[in-house]
Image (cartoon, rainbow, N blue to C red):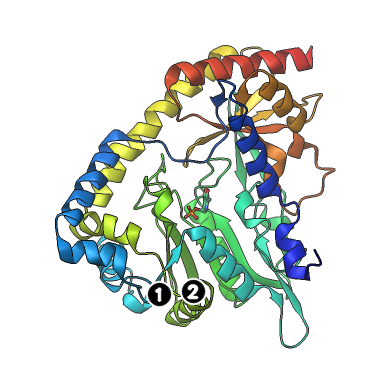
Amino acid sequence: MKLSKFGKKFTGTAGITSLMDDLGNALASGQDLIMMGGGNPAHVPAVEAVFKKRLEKILNDTESFRRLIGIYDPPAGNHDFISALVSLFRKEYGWDISEKNIALTNGSQSAFFSLFNMFAGEFDDGTFKKIRLPLAPEYIGYADAGLNKDFFVSTKPKIDTTGENRFKYRVDFHSFDIGSETGAICVSRPTNPTGNVLTDDEIVKLDALARQHKIPLILDNAYGFPFPGLIFKNAKPFWNENTILCMSLSKLGLPATRTGITIASEEIIRSMAGINAILNLSTGGFGGMLAMDIVKSGEIIDLSNNVIRPYYETKLNKALKIIKKEFQGLDYAVHEPEGAMFIWLWLKDLPITSLELYERLKRRGVIVVSGHYFFTGISSSYKHRDECLRITYSQNEAKVSEGLRIIAEEVRKAVQ
Ligand code: PLP
């Protein structure tokens, strides 16, 4: 098959496809695996109950049911759901936004594809711009979303020791040089894979830099406030006319509905709607319909604060305790788990690569994700790249405990 550049780029080996293939193959192997590799949100019974009830209400009302299955929404998404979101954000945060500032997309992943390619790539004047990630490790889903190669520039993190066996990545503003080649800045807050939550101060500085260079700041809020609210420390929600805030219903518990929410200037939202129309004709309305009532009533915030966050936080604290016990004597550090749903483990001076450790763990039936995948745009000579693992802790306690025990055992074997 002879393929265009686009065809080649999007069918070739991408980090995310090889990772997904590998996880998929491991799962299909039929082995009884301890799955600590996925990014799927947990099935939280109290959350499922809310959506089940809402679905039943829709099914019992002919008009609503027709809306659910039988109507193309406008390219920017369902107007009633957008209105409900506008009221929520205005009321909660006082943001000066209207319906013209929000577009829905089929998952926030598809918003990133549109946004990245709107602000980076080839321009009319022949220049080529890139998306700047202020900090790697960063979400792997960005890495291949550019239409061209070499689409991202990123900076190594500053690593601060924050306590015994604890560290935190910070944006290294000194090595952070925005040139005319930068089309937009993008950062996830909380960050997948590390659970880092950039400080309010870092966000204010990034905002100032973005304005100074007249480029947008894309903030990926897939795990943030007000929903799903997976932030375990104080952090101010942030938006202004120069910020493109991307949210999602996925981590709230609705990943299958593919509902992304972008809040941005009217001009950007009009452009996103245009891209939506060409790529998708219309935006799927299922997620919006399911979440409509809880957005209108504000219950989505209570659900996030009182059900979802405590659910993950309890599991996180249990996993941290187990790590402390199992990793005693090993040279390791955990990134400050400030948000999202992962533990990021740094195995200092590991004599094998994290990928090799991943392979060894897979043979023991434990699936994690090797950290090297997340260092988009960082040279392979950076040793830290090969010393980290991303661990998902949302499975049942016994499995997580056993998984962590096996990880510690394999690390001990590797360093002996
Ligand atoms: N951003 C981050 C940081 C993520 O971890 C994910 C999914 O794992 C996404 C965006 C994309 O989520 P979705 O397309 O389901 O909204």
Question: Is any part of residue 347 visible from this angle?
Answer: yes
Q: Residues within 10 Å of mark 1 (few under 14, many from 20)?
A: many
The residue that appears at 14% across and 54% down in the rendered structure is 60
Between discs 1 and 2, the one toward the N terminus: 1
Label 1 sits on a secondary structure element that is loop
Q: Position of residue 227 (x, y in %)?
A: 35, 51
Instruction: Report if the beta carbon of the residue with label 2 is closer than 8 angstroms to ligand 1.
Output: no
Residue 276 numbered tag: 2
The residue wearing badge 1 is: 76
Q: How many marks?
A: 2
In this view of the protein, which residue sits in the foreground, 282 or 151?
Answer: 282
Amino acid at dot 1: Ala
Q: Are marks 1 and 2 in contact (CB under 8 Å)?
A: yes
Q: Position of residue 126 (x, y in %)?
A: 78, 84
The residue that appears at 25% across and 59% down in the rendered structure is 292
Instruction: In the rendered view, tell whether residue 134 sits above or below residue 15.
Output: below
Is residue 228 left or right of 244 when viewed as pictured? left
Instruction: In the rendered view, tell whether residue 142 sits above or below residue 372.
Output: below
Q: Position of residue 44 (x, y in %)?
A: 33, 35
Marks 1/2: CA distance?
A: 7 Å
